[in-house]
Image (spheres, helix red, strand yellow):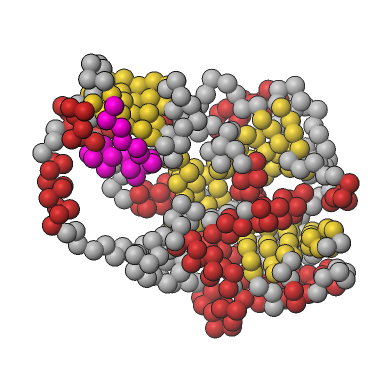
Amino acid sequence: MPDLILSVSNNILKASVLSKEGLLQSSVDVSPEIVDQDGSINNTQELAQAIFKVVEGFTAVKKRHLQLVYLLQPSQSELFFVTSSKNQDSLDTFIIEEAKNKLTEDIDSYYFAYKKIAPFVYQFIAVKKQLLDSILGLSLELKMPLKAVLPWVLLLPKFMQSNDPAVFISTNGTSDEKMLALAELNGIYHVEEKYTFKDAAAMNAYIDELRVFKKASPINRLYLVDGEDDSKLESSFEVSRLLELDEDFAQAKGYEVHLMAESMLKDNPELLQTQVNALNLLPLPAVSRSLVPVYAGVAMSAAVVLLVVSGYVFLYRPRLEASRLAASNTDNAPTVLSQETQTNDTTQGSADLEDEDAIEDLNKEDIVLRVENGAGIAGLASQTRATLEELGYKVEGIGDSDKSGLETTTIQIKESKKAYASVLEEDLQDEFTVEILTDLPEDSEYDVLITLGSN
């Protein structure tokens, strides 16, 4: 089924469908009584009527064959990083408390979730409950299956397929106020929808101030999402367009974000299972953790419950299928925190208890560790040293590894100290994908060499 991609910004409704005849696109003004300036939907019925009028002009497609993809504007989602350490008593509680300090409104007014994107680093996303519930209601008015609700800013680093730091700017053609998004580790840690800068030097200083991972060299990769090139940026940044429109899409100016979303959903359908699709922020009924390890919500809002009665199973089947897939793939699925989480852990067997007793007999201070950064994430070795020292280890030194861009963390340990291998693996496996090697020479000045990867 073709996707009907919708976005509303500055009271302008944009709609597009990629058909066999090419990109069909149209726009129409909508009054503040229908959609607020900030994109909040006030009247789903009248917005549905406006959409019907737009779709009627797309004679190459039939309305009953369309499925809805709704794009959220930068101000309609809140995105930031939360960093933690290994010894957090409860990661969920810690992240919620951190989020309370960063969210612009009370946390109870949001659907929200987090996903680990690097050791000690989590991408947090929150969307207003009222907005998401309104979009669900809109799809009922349209009688169209709702395929996805996409905060398009979160698509930007996914589109580039890079963990490297980058700046994204939407120029809106003529305005001096820019949408500024800062990305690293394939995630978004800062968004400012109306940013004004005097020159490139001022913007560089501002970006450096906001950086999560401090490095000697500034960020120099800058992507224009839409609009014209800005000469004030060219001297300090390597400026590229996010999308180079060829002859087939020359008329798509102003619809670049629609094209990006269309491309992402076509080439990376697994994104529907992740927090990039805000439908996955909706809490599902609690079930056994052994069946659904990450969806732990116990109830939906009253509006969503109403949608269940009105035909949720039919309209949102794509989401239900994505949820089942996500339940079997915890690497992609976000941890939903919008409702109180429920654990259903089973009692440990006697063999596991015996293993824990054996681990406790080992004195962590009896081995000497060195930690090296092979991931290229600034500050990772220092953070890991602090975590290991809090756990009782003796870390004699840290530094950068000769290797770079590693994903898996290797623990090289002396044969004489291999009894500690399982202890180290246990202490690091929550943050890293670990590989144990007992090949460290016995004459090394340290007993263990940990080379950190990004996963």
Q: Give the percent coordinates (x, y) of residue 50.
A: 80, 70
Q: Quadrant of the C terminus?
A: top left
Task: Specify the segment rendered in magenta.
Answer: 422-439
- Residue 311 lies in the magenta-colored region: no
Pinpoint residue 447: horizontal percent, then vertical percent.
23, 24
Quadrant (top left/top right/bottom left/bottom right) for the N terminus: bottom right
Question: In this rendering, is residue 371 above or below 285?
Answer: above
Total marks shown come to 0
Viewer-closest of 271 and 195 = 271
The residue shown at (42%, 22%) is: 401
Residue depicted at x 69% and y 42%: 179
Where residue 153 appears, as percent x and y from the top left, is 64, 48
Q: Residue at x 78, y 70 (%)?
A: 51
Residue 142 higher or lower than 75, as above or below:
below
Write down the quadrant of residue 146 in the picture. bottom right
Please state which of residues 307 and 403 is positioned toward the viewer in this rendering: 403
- In which image quadrant can residue 184 be found? top right
x and y, in percent, of residue 381 in the image = 38, 27
Query: Residue shown at 71%/52% (left/top)?
Result: 263
Can residue 325 be seen from the camera position used here? Answer: yes
Q: Give left or right: position of 225 versus 210.
A: right
Q: Which image quadrant is residue 397 in?
A: top left
